[in-house]
Image (spheres, grey):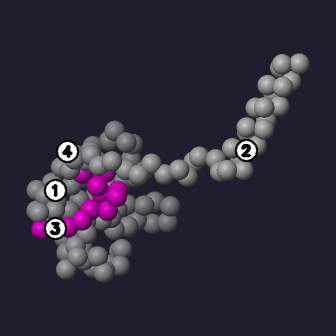
Amino acid sequence: MATKIRLARGGSKKRPHYAIVASDSRMPRDGRFLEKLGTYNPLLPKDSEDRIKMDLDRVKHWLDQGAQPTDRVARFLEAAGVREKATRANMKKAQPGKKALERAAEKAAKTEEAAAE
């Protein structure tokens, strides 16, 4: 069975509250889970102790059993010191495309010509 440690959403509209759960990866996000491991309340300030609560012993148990944490849960575990900090792919999404680079080069060339005259 492929097991994941992930977030299950609760709360009302625009007021999210998440449970950190160990579940079979084939189950729906908010569906059946094996064990509730903690809670996450994104509405609280980042420095609040109540924002993320986890039973670290049970989390370690599930990790030893082969459970794979999702990206967000992996970040929580890194902050708690349970996992080593992973290197993440630096996406080139924020970089301009070819045409934008060409336009910027043309504009820079025109400004140099104007400054030289």
Q: Which residue is mark 3?
A: 66
Q: Which residue is mark 4?
A: 81
Kindly state the secondary structure of the residue where label 3 is placed: loop
- The quarter holding residue 107 reads top right
Q: Which residue is mark 2?
A: 102
Q: Which corner quadrant holds the C terminus?
A: top right
Residue 55 numbered tag: 1
Compared across the picture, whether 31 is left or right of 95 comes to left
47 magenta-colored = no
Amino acid type, mark 1: Asp
- The quarter holding residue 55 reads bottom left
Stretch of the chain drawn in magenta: 65-77
Structural crowding at the residue carrying mark 1, measured as other residues with C-alpha within 10 Å and reported as few (<14), some (14–19) or many (≥20): few
Structural crowding at the residue carrying mark 4, measured as other residues with C-alpha within 10 Å and reported as few (<14), some (14–19) or many (≥20): few
Label 3 – label 1 distance at C-alpha: 17 Å
Residue 80 image offset from top left, x and y in percent: 22, 46
Label 3 – label 2 distance at C-alpha: 49 Å
Amino acid type, mark 3: Gly
